[in-house]
Image (spheres, rainbow, N blue to C red):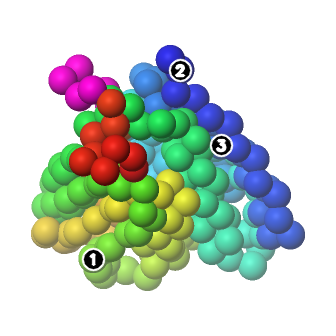
Amino acid sequence: MTRIAEVTRTTGETDITVRLDLDGTGACDIATGVPFFDHMLNAFGRHGLFDLTVHATGDIEVDAHHTVEDTGIVLGQAFARALGDKVGIRRFADVAIPMDETLVMAAVDISGRGQAYCDLPVPCERVGTFDTELAVEFFYAFARDARLTLHVRELVGGNTHHIIEAAFKAAGRCLRLACEHDPRVHGVPSTKGSL
Ligand SMILES: [Mn+2]
């Protein structure tokens, strides 16, 4: 069974297409018009071992807010669709990713309830042209539309680029583990029988 989804969403502010293969090899084709965000989505896909295409055009002449948040929405929708009935998945995972002096953890439950909890303080307001407060906006939008529970927590922070990149790597790796099939799991991994 392939776990692939393609979602396109067009609004007055953004036009976004995401193609996702949960069982890929980390092959990414990312173009959002926001260079640091491209770097983050590449890290997410590469370390999640997802094949991920993200093509976004947005009103970045205003700022990157709509583009980043709406990409989170569309990527979340693609995850929910690709996961399908969730039969045989691990469901839970947690990882901590170091980047030199920085250490960020992510924990996920493919719960069916979309919610993110982020504690990701950063010393700088910008990395390149990227407003650093947008990182958590992405995670909130993504988790809501993927209908999963995501915690992202900075354990030790230093450089702002490192903190945000470690968060995206941790989220990607964590989602890989939670979405993967566990051969010992039969059916949907919930005592309720559905997620
Ligand atoms: Mn980097």
Q: Which residues are magenta?
A: 180-186
Q: Please, what secondary structure does the residue beneath circle 2 have? A: loop
Residue 190: x and y in percent read: 28, 46
Q: Please, what secondary structure does the residue beneath circle 3 have? A: strand
Q: CA distance from mark 2 to mark 1?
A: 34 Å
Q: CA distance from mark 2 to mark 3?
A: 16 Å
User: Which residue is more in the foreground, 152 or 167?
Assistant: 152
Outermost right residue: 12
Q: Residue at x 25, y 57 (%)?
A: 106
Q: Residue at x 28, y 40 (%)?
A: 189
Residue 6: x and y in percent read: 68, 37
Classify 10 Å Cα crowding around label 1: few (below 14), some (14-19), many (20 and above): few
Question: Which residue type carries mark 1?
Answer: Asp
Label annotation for residue 2: 2
Residue occupied by mark 1: 119
Classify 10 Å Cα crowding around label 2: few (below 14), some (14-19), many (20 and above): few
Residue occupied by mark 3: 18
Residue 41 to residue 72: above or below = above
Left or right of 192? Residue 76 is: right
Principal secondary structure, stretch drawn in magenta:
loop
Q: CA distance from mark 1 to mark 3?
A: 27 Å
The image quadrant of residue 148 is: bottom left
Classify 10 Å Cα crowding around label 3: few (below 14), some (14-19), many (20 and above): many
Q: Residue at x 50, y 17 (%)?
A: 1
